[in-house]
Amino acid sequence: MTVTAAAPPSTVSGKATSLTAGQLPKWLPWALLGLGMLVSGSVFTILNLGGELHDFNIAGALFFGFLFFAVSTVIFSNIVETSRHAADRLATVLVSFAFTLALIPLVSLLYTVVVDGITRFDPTFFSWTMRNVVGEGGGAVHAIWGTLLVTLAASVISVPIGLLTSIYLVEYGRGRLAKSITFFVDVMTGIPSIVAGLFVVALFSMVIGPGQYMGIMGALSLTVLMIPVVVRSSEEMLRLVPNELREASYALGVPKWLTIAKVVLPTAIAGITTGIMLSVSRVIGETAPLLLTAGFTTSLNLDLFNQPMMTLPVFVYTQFQNPGTNIDAALGRAWAGALTLIIIVMVLNLLARFIAKRFAPKFGR
């Protein structure tokens, strides 16, 4: 019996392939990252000797520390592993850096809002208005109710219109009319928010006269901003529904309108709900159109069709712009209003995820 010797491992550019090459220890990249930050921090500390603490260049230290980490990781990977592994690690480092860079402003924003706004998160803030309050105290209950009512009214108007428009474009629309609708929806997506407010002001000035401020005007201005977002997001979700599902329904004799209601919409409900929540998040923090339409008031008003109605974005703006006799108290109320607005958006998104998960079709056996 003849015994043949095992073939030597194949090589690429004189190095072993990934099947036979060594690998860097899992702890080494973290060690290189820590070493890079230590070296960079030490260098910038030496350069800042004799200066003030606030003159220390944190951004520069982090950047050069990360640069040291990226270069050293690629060098070690190229020595121990292969050039392909080194390129892969470089791409991973760059993607991680981009993710971290995008996350820093978000974390910084949330930290600042929470730290500055939590001090006024008390029962008074959620039970009092700003009526006859010029210094400390006061609350934003009138602004919270105004935001909820205006946003709810805008959603009730815009969601059916946007959803039905997207159904028409995907299921029925053909020819010039569908192309024209798509074009105008794209144009509306990019209009400035203050233009929507001016449009509603001009419309109501012709109908009931100038100088009017009402919650329904604010809701209509937000509707102009919400409709194109709902249309585009719902349209994309409906196009993702496989045509095989529609054809199977038609083959069973189900009419088209019932196929849309029972097959297409339930299949795309998760994406549609997410798109609706994105449109709500897009408009709930708008300030310019609400300043022009809903106006400003220090009292609680629950009537959308009579008198000005306060909203949280306008409340935050006025507290910063017109702090009154006690600047610190006004700034505390403003930060608390901003934190409340973020919490409302977070709750709405969690609710949307629950609804999408609850009503999404189950494909498991």
Image (spheres, rainbow, N blue to C red):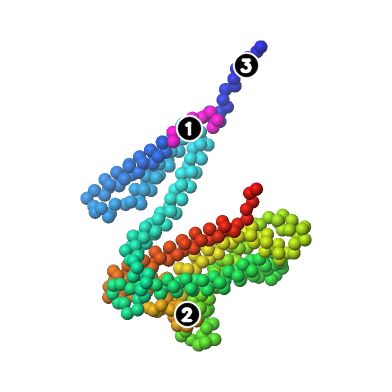
Q: Is residue 172 left or right of residue 328?
A: right
**Outermost residue, left direction?**
50
Q: Which residue is mark 1?
A: 23
**Image coords of residue 340 (percent x, y):** 40, 65
Camera-side residue of 23 and 223: 223
Give the CA separation, mark 3 to mark 1: 30 Å
Name the kind of residue labelled 1 in the image. Gln
Q: Closer to us: mark 2 or mark 1?
A: 2
The type of residue carrying mark 3 is Thr
Against 123, residue 84 (above or below) is: above
Q: Is residue 198 visible?
A: no
Residue type for callout 2 = Asp
Q: Nearer the N terminus, badge 2 or badge 3? A: 3
Query: Along the horizontal axis of the image, is 66 left or right of 48?
Result: right
Q: Residue at x 57, y 62 (%)?
A: 273
Between disc 2 and disc 3, the foreground one is: 2
Ranked by sequence position, the earlier of labels 2 and 1 is 1
- Which residue is more in the foreground, 198 or 137? 137
Q: Furthest residue to the bottom? A: 209
Do the residues under discs 2 and 1 have CB atoms within 8 angstroms?
no
User: Could you say which is closer to the camera, residue 126 or residue 8?
Assistant: 126
- Residue range corresponding to the magenta coloring: 15-26
Q: Secondary structure at mark 2?
A: loop
Q: Residues within 10 Å of mark 2 (few under 14, many from 20)?
A: some
Say which label, 3 or 1, has the lower sequence index: 3
Q: Helix, strand, or loop for circle 1? A: loop
Name above or below for residue 362 compared with residue 20.
below
Instruction: Provide the residue designation for mark 3.
Output: 4
Q: Is residue 359 left or right of residue 285?
A: right
